[in-house]
Amino acid sequence: MASDEDWNVVFEYSRAQAIADGVLINVTEQAKATGFKVHTVVTGTLYHGYVVPPAGLDGSFGQSVTGRLHDVLTLALFAARASKGTERVYFKVDFLMAPGKSETVDIIAHIGPGDTPAPVLTIMMPEDD
């Protein structure tokens, strides 16, 4: 069997690079305030597509990045607590996308090793997986 040193690495892209590039958004502080204990990111697709409120949903609609991220993290925590012993949970979040129009989005939370063996949490949409 070949050792790791025998492989010719074609391309390597670390979690740290993905955060620096904006592909992953570090939300660890907000996640810790919600109850998570590990480094946590959301994908750029989820963050920019749904966590950031669409134009036209200003404060009069009660929409903010903080509030929408809180909803995602809280529902991820509920799903994780209900599914002990698994590395992946699936849940849905309703987002207000325009006045009077909401969208239900399927989301995945996955815990596993990141750039090191230490566990990290990634919250993403199915197409980001």
Image: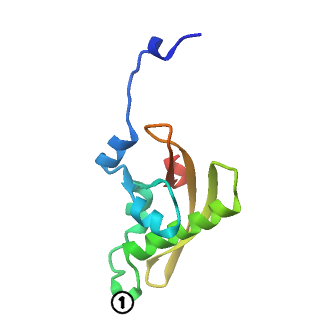
- What residue sits 69% from the left and 56% below the top? 84
Q: Amino acid at mark 1?
A: Ser
Residue 116: image x %, image y %? 45, 37
Q: Nearer the viewer, residue 7 or 93?
A: 7
Question: x, y (%) of residue 9?
Answer: 40, 20
Res. 50 image quadrant = bottom left
Residue drawn at x 36%, y 49% is 23
Q: Is residue 53 visible?
A: no
Q: Up-down: is 81 above or below 112?
A: below
Which one is nearer the viewer's eye here, 77 or 105? Answer: 77
SS for callout 1: helix
**As displayed, is residue 54 above or below residue 3?**
below
Q: In the displayed image of the protein, which residue is found farthest to the left?
A: 20
Q: Position of residue 93 (x, y in %)?
A: 56, 69
Q: Nearer the viewer, residue 60 or 87?
A: 87
Q: Which residue is mark 1?
A: 60
Asked if residue 58 is positioned above or below residue 17 in the image, the reply reads: below
- The residue furthest bottom is 60
Residue found at x 37% / y 55%: 25
